[in-house]
Image: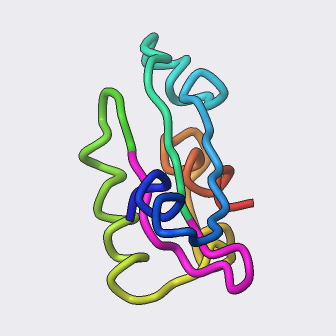
Amino acid sequence: MADTDAFSEGRKVRVTKVPFWAQARALINDDPRGSVKIVSDPATGVVRGGSIVGRHAAELIPILAIAVANGLTVTDIHESPRVHKTLAEALAKAAE
């Protein structure tokens, strides 16, 4: 669900966005363009949707899709294991 869809339906959502330039891997790759956005329910933390834009976005989209399909929360994403210096850290940061 997009944040604009939720707003138009009168639903409250929490939207967090993290730019790739704030991630070490994007700087190492010398391509800091792009971002991760997570849309979640502010009361429950359940991930409702989001978007990932930029180089290597295809590597991160499945994580967000699994979260939405399985009713995972932002806490689930934030606490999931990840390797340091990967773009997946942007998802964890957005889930804080």
Q: Position of residue 42 (x, y in %)?
A: 71, 73
Question: Residue visible at 43% across and 76% down?
Answer: 67
In this rendering, the answer to whether 42 lies above or below 17 is: below
Question: Residue visible at 29% across and 63% down?
Answer: 62
Q: Is 37 on the left-hand or right-hand side of 92?
A: left
Residues rendered magenta in the picture: 40-51
> What's the colour scheme?
rainbow
Question: Residue visible at 69% across and 76% down?
Answer: 75
Question: Residue visible at 31% across and 55% down?
Answer: 61
Quarter holding residue 55? top left
Q: Nearer the viewer, residue 84 or 60?
A: 60
Residue 47 on the magenta span:
yes
Q: Position of residue 53 (x, y in %)?
A: 36, 34
Q: Position of residue 76 (x, y in %)?
A: 61, 79
Count of picture labels: 0
Quarter holding residue 73? bottom right
Q: Is 42 on the left-hand or right-hand side of 29?
A: right
Residue 42 on the magenta span:
yes
Q: Is 83 on the left-hand or right-hand side of 43?
A: left
Q: Nearer the viewer, residue 30 or 48?
A: 48
In this rendering, the answer to whether 68 lies above or below 78 is: below
Q: Nearer the viewer, residue 34 or 80?
A: 34
Q: Position of residue 38 (x, y in %)?
A: 53, 56
Quarter holding residue 43? bottom right
Quadrant containing the C terminus in the rendered view:
bottom right
In this rendering, the answer to whether 1 lies above or below 47 is: above
Outermost top residue = 30
Quadrant containing the N terminus in the rendered view:
bottom left
